[in-house]
Amino acid sequence: MNAPAPKKLTPIARRGLMLVISSPSGAGKSTISRALMEDDPTLGMSVSVTTRQRRPSEIAGRHYHFISIREFERMRDSDALLEWAEVHGNFYGTPREPVEIAMAEGRDMLFDIDWQGARQLQEKMTADVVSIFVLPPTMTELQSRLHRRAEDTEEVIRTRLLNSRSEIEHWREYDYIIVNEDLDTAFDSVRSIVKAERLRRDRRHGLYGFVTKLLEEEPEL
Ligand code: ADP
Ligand code: 5GP
């Protein structure tokens, strides 16, 4: 007769991870974030509110919640936003409730937000935030990616390029820096970061019980 299969361990409980990804516009953070979500369906994406116009390829409620300035102010003033900022002349913010629910349930969440938002989350939720900054290989390549994306007007692209330098100046405030030259390599690096960060001792409160039980076990010699 075959020996019974060994019982599988229940996963060791841990706190949820808040993965923050920033970059100058066009460096590839949305592309990397999308790939990450496809690769790992347990990862939730924080859907921001914004007052900017919807791009042709964007779906309301999936990429952003597109709202009026008045509605944005109402949310901001009633503390419904975990963080918010003005970026390229529009308002953006992270709705508080979905994040609090995900964190309480120990689920991981991804945030595609700028350096101002990253700073606010790092201050408020220091232990849970892991931050990644994506750099383009060259400024010329950044410019061509913005043009290739072909979703913004020439004027919008110009503003974003002008703002890219001041965004890049904040690179030192992030835990990890990825130069997105080859997409597969960049994605692979981000995946490794997530994998390692999930194993950090200080996030895994379930280890206390696990190790206690482990040491109670006394196999017969
Ligand atoms: P961001 O979210 O940072 O503004 P996107 O993810 O929208 O940038 O990427 C901008 C454009 O660059 C898109 O057309 C995307 O397909 C392209 N892109 C992203 N990463 C790379 C890469 N490593 N090599 C070439 N093109 C890329
Ligand atoms: P885009 O208009 O290209 O979608 O985003 C412009 C910038 O706003 C990007 O740097 C993006 O990361 C940032 N952004 C998007 N949502 C938020 C948010 O909720 N908060 C903050 N602070 N920035 C955001």
Image (tube, grey):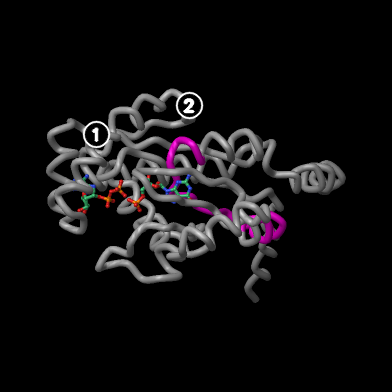
Q: Is mark 1 within 8 Å of ligand 2?
A: no
* Residue 43 appears in view: no
Mark 2 = which residue?
173
Say which quarter of the image contains residue 151.
bottom left
Q: Secondary structure at mark 1?
A: helix
Classify the position of the N terminus by image quarter: bottom right
Residue name at image x 40 percent, y 63 percent: 63
Q: Which residue is mark 1?
A: 162
In terms of depth relative to the viewer, which is nearer, 32 or 112?
112
* Figure disc tally: 2
Q: Is residue 208 visible?
A: yes
Say the numbered circle drawn on residue 175: none
Q: Which dot, 2 or 1, sits closer to the camera?
A: 1
Image height of 41 relative to 213, above or below: below
Instruction: In the rendered view, tell whether residue 122 sits above or below residue 56.
Output: above
- Is residue 13 shown in magenta? no
The residue at 34%/34% (across/down) is: 178
- Density class for disc 1 (Cα within 10 Å; few <14, some 14-19, many ≥20) is few
Report the front residue among 3 and 125: 125
Tell me which residue sits at (67%, 56%) in the image.
78
Q: Secondary structure at mark 2?
A: helix
Residue 115 is one of the magenta-drawn residues = yes
Magenta-drawn segment: 99-117
